[in-house]
Image (cartoon, helix red, strand yellow):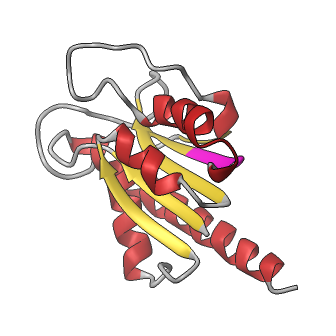
């Protein structure tokens, strides 16, 4: 089973990039008995539980590093795992903490094959809708994820 999880907040403009990728993948008919698509919003705990029992995990989210908006990073999950550091808001237990916690709690039931796609945001202010550069990047990431899913399916059938 492959879990593809989009993270973000649709009410914060480009922060909805991961959710847009999930929408595009749904419209392409990627979901199946072996591919689970999930919109986690800002719920890191949901990422951890949706990934449990899967062999592969793909996480998509927006990032803000200061480079040109629409830039895409494809990173092994192990490079981004972080232990949870408690805070005072609902967004504190993010997917990066979920990767670390899921591996610690679920052990062999948590996927070791984890890939993260980060899309550089132009704006994370209040508002609905992605900027043009982030919408293009979301389509590019959807293409790449679809390709990875197909490669995995082909490998499983040989």
**Image side of residue 20 versus residue 143, left or right:** left
Part of the protein shown in magenta: 112-116
Using the image, determine if residue 106 lies above or below residue 20: above
Q: How far across and down, in percent of the image, does residue 49 sit?
A: 44, 50
- Give the vertical position of 99 relative to 6 (above or below): above
Q: Which corner quadrant of the image does residue 87 belong to?
A: top left
Q: Quadrant of the C terminus?
A: bottom right
Where does residue 145 sit, x and y in percent of width and height?
Answer: 58, 64
- Tell me, yes or no, whether the highlighted magenta stretch contains residue 58: no
| Quarter of the figure that contains the N terminus | bottom right
In-image side of 126 versus 78 (left or right): left
Residue 3 relative to residue 95: left or right: right
Picture residue at 49% right of the left edge, 26% below the top: 67
Residue 48 in view of the camera: yes
Q: Is residue 5 above or below residue 36?
A: above
Q: Give the percent coordinates (x, y) of residue 53.
A: 58, 59
**Residue 133: in sight, yes or no?**
no
At 20% from the left edge and 49% from the top edge, which residue is drawn?
10
Q: Residue at x 37, y 40 (%)?
A: 45
| Residue extending furthest toward the right | 158
| Left or right: 81, with 10 as reference point | right
Q: Nearer the viewer, residue 40 or 62?
A: 40
Q: Main secondary structure of the magenta part?
A: strand
Q: Nearer the viewer, residue 5 or 14?
A: 5
State how many labels appear. 0
Point 52% across, 40% down: residue: 71
């Amino acid at each position: 089973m492959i879990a593809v999880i989009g993270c973000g907040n649709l009410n914060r403009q480009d922060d909805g990039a991961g959710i847009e990728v999930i929408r595009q993948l749904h419209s392409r008919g990627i979901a199946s008995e072996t591919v689970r698509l999930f919109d986690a919003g800002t719920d890191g705990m949901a990422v951890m539980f949706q990934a449990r029992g899967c062999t592969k995990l793909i996480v998509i989210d927006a990032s803000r590093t200061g480079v040109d908006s629409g830039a895409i990073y494809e990173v092994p999950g192990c490079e981004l795992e972080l232990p949870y550091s408690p805070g005072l808001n609902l967004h504190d237990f993010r997917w990066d903490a979920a990767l670390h916690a899921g591996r610690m709690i679920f052990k062999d039931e948590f996927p070791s094959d984890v890939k993260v796609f980060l899309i550089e945001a132009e704006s994370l202010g209040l508002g609905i809708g992605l900027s043009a550069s982030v919408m293009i990047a979301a389509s590019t990431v959807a293409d790449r994820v679809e390709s990875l899913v197909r490669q995995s399916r082909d490998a499983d059938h040989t």
